[in-house]
Amino acid sequence: MSFRVAARTILQLGSELISSDTIAFYELIKNGFDAGSKRVEIEFLIRVPGDLWDDCDAALSEIERRSSSNDPLTLEAIKRKLIEGVDRSAPKADGFVEEMQVASSFADLRSSFQRANTITVRDWGAGMSMAILADAFLTIGTRYRRAEREGGKPNSKAGVTLGDKGVGRLSVMRLGSQMLVATSQENERNWHELRIDWEIFSHDSDTLLNEIPIRPTEGPLKDTPKVSGTELHIWGLSHSWTFGQVEEIARTEFARFMDPFASKRSESIGVKFNAANVTIPRFDKLLFDNAHASLTATFSPNSSNSEFEVPLVAGTIDYSEMDQKTDFRIDPLDLASITEMPVSVVRDIGPFQFELHWWNRRILRAIEGIGDRKLVRSLLDRWSGGVAVYRDGYRVNPYGGTDDDWLGLDKDAFRASGYKLNRGQIVAKLTISRDANPHLVDQTNREGLQHNVHFLALRAIVKHILEDRLREFLDETDMRDRLSRIESVDQLEVRTKRSGQRVRESLRQLRNIAPNEVKEVGILDDVEDLLKDIDRTFSNARLRVQNYREERERLVGLAGTGLLVELVAHELNRATTNALTMVSNAVDDPTLAPARSILTILGAQLRTVRTRLTVLDDMSTSGRQVKVSFDFVDWVRNILENHDPQFERHYIRVAFRTVPEGAGQMPVRMVRGMVVQILENLLSNSVYWLAMQKREHPRFEPQIWVTVDVQARTLTFTDNGPGIERSRAEEVFRAFVTTKPPGEGSGLGLYIAREVANYHKAMLRLSSEPSIHAGKLNTFILSLANVER
């Protein structure tokens, strides 16, 4: 026994596996280059346009399905509709009209209609002999190209082999249902032809693949025996193409097929629509010359200064807009940590080169040789989109496309205010090769690379370069620049007073030199009054700064109160609802037998209400800003105990301890309600994510650990939830930053918690120490070392 392959498997490998027309064209173009052709042309012949094609195609399909002689859609009606809608400017339009006119049956009309619109893919490569066409071309999964690469390369024209899976030709059925292959090798007299009707490989058929006969035939004589190459004629198109659609795919896809940033780029792809050339735009390198920042990096599996094979990343960031430049280096152990992979896996990625150019869209300006700001922006829109991947100079689709975010940069999120890096700001490429990077393998459906450990390691490295090297350097450079240009009120006041003293000294000297003239003019008195006004202005400015700080503290307090009220209200609503339900049930019970147990539960619910109201009282306006002395250990314990019902509902185990074990009090002088704000926000986030993980993984056992170190005067808060990415260790403390869905979080909790900590001269941060999950941060540390006692 052996496997029997159903004919419909061809559909699954072709039209269903190839997910887009773009991928289908890529496969056919690559086949041409693999045959050694220096150029591949795609020609669209569209004689029946868009909507008319779809309408008539649907009508003919319906007639075939019905097989009814009394169908209201007559042969003449469809013929008339087709003929009236034909694009008479299209090549061979008159011949098509004549063919329609003589069609005497629905079958003839259907056949002619399918040939109305065609796509031809043409190359001038080595071509195929009759034997190769019969053997290699009709063998699904053939090793023909791989054998060429690994062996002696019988095809002398072929250069770099782009494909070797032996399924690329099946992408034709994505474009149309009918195909004619015409091919020949150099010095052969005839063309060899192969016709395939992909519709016979239907899901409606139980026919086995080997039961469908497909044989090549001898074609016409060649005009010139030395000519070689292959033409694929495709008809019965899946849909009608318009000039705009072809122009769009040429602009967005074909323009990126070969490395558009290479120093030398030939016109290797040609596109025509009804005999008119379709322009494939070229990249204008003046745009690179005017980038605001650029980054180059190389990955070398072998360190140049070591006898051992170890991976190494070395790169340079040039922030030309700020005239700042830096070099960086990522050593083997760092790479292992970044990728969470063994060094051996990282090394086996193979060498690659990375190049990126970045623009701050807010300060785009006209570029001589390109045009005004609008044209520059348009050009950047066309070529930006993230990091494209090129293997041996040819694009690995879909990386770097407008809809692709393989690095997780998330264009929409990163366009928010304050973000330096998003796909709309960068044009970048990653360069690999088939020979040097054998572990980076194309997926069978050509949708990128297989997600094996080597690809995951590659992605982690590139992401680290972008987020932890480039963005950090841009942010730090801008921050230093801002700080260098900003003076505090104190600095301005000191500088102004010194200038005022010099002016007053000059006035005194003028009065001594020419007292009568100065008195008559009176200008010196005006200058003196002006200096006094400046002194008063700075005094007012100082008061305004102090008022701003106090108002900011009040606003933070009010915002914290609002968030806490929301949390408490939820708990109160749940507790009181349960209590009222129990009371109602007790009243309705004629026996009142369970009264004692019900009242016991009711008492517990009401005690919860009371304790939560106690916490809320500490957040009241009268108590919010009042610092009092209290035991921090006891207060933290009390806050955690108030959450016991919530912990039970979510099956969360909470462990609270002190260091040293059993330590006594830790006196502090703080606003008790503000301490509640800090802990409530930590608890709220933790409970949310632990509950989420519990829902995803029912066997997961959520835990929270809270430790108060009396000697170090710190509180450590840890959970075993999903954690926070190291790159977001500071980002999570910014206002309005949240990964929760709408209605679950405002993005203010941790921001307010840190502001409240700063108000007490405490410090809230994420610990960078090793965590529960590699690469994630799970521990918050609240340092109270500088807090009043």
Image (spheres, rainbow, N blue to C red):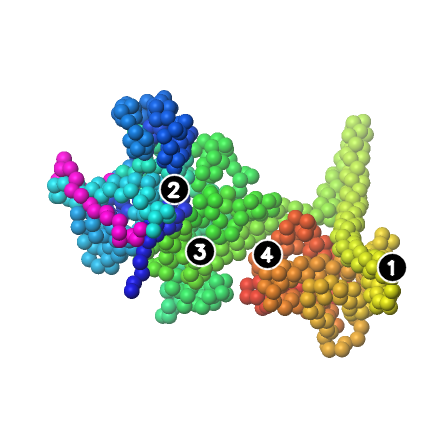
Which residue range is magenta in the image? 207-232
Q: Quadrant of the N terminus?
A: bottom left
For marks 4 and 2 on the same chain, the one whose residue lies earlier in the sequence? 2
Instruction: Tell me the crowding category of disc 3: few under 14, some 14 to 19, or many 20 or more residues within 10 angstroms, Cα based.
Output: some
* Residue placed under numbered mark 4 in the picture: 728
Badge 4 marks a residue whose secondary structure is helix
Instruction: Confirm whether residue 566 shows in the render.
Output: yes
**Disc nearest the viewer among 4 and 2:** 2
- Structural distance between the alpha carbons of marks 4 and 3: 23 Å
For marks 2 and 3 on the same chain, the one whose residue lies earlier in the sequence? 2
**Disc nearest the viewer among 2 and 3:** 2
Residue 20 vs residue 628, the one in the foreground: 20
**Disc nearest the viewer among 1 and 3:** 1
* Percent position of residue 70, x then y: 39, 28
Looking at the picture, does residue 40 appear above or below residue 620?
above
Badge 3 marks a residue whose secondary structure is strand
* Residue placed under numbered mark 1 in the picture: 587
Identity of the residue drawn at 70% across and 71% down = 655
Identity of the residue drawn at 37% across and 57% down = 441
- Structural distance between the alpha carbons of marks 4 and 2: 38 Å
212 falls in the magenta region? yes
Looking at the picture, does residue 544 appear above or below residue 771?
above
Identity of the residue drawn at 47% across and 51% down = 406
Left or right position of 703 against 662? left
* Residue placed under numbered mark 2 in the picture: 21
- Which quadrant holds residue 179? top left
For marks 4 and 3 on the same chain, the one whose residue lies earlier in the sequence? 3
* Residue placed under numbered mark 3 in the picture: 315
Instruction: Tell me the crowding category of disc 2: few under 14, some 14 to 19, or many 20 or more residues within 10 angstroms, Cα based.
Output: some
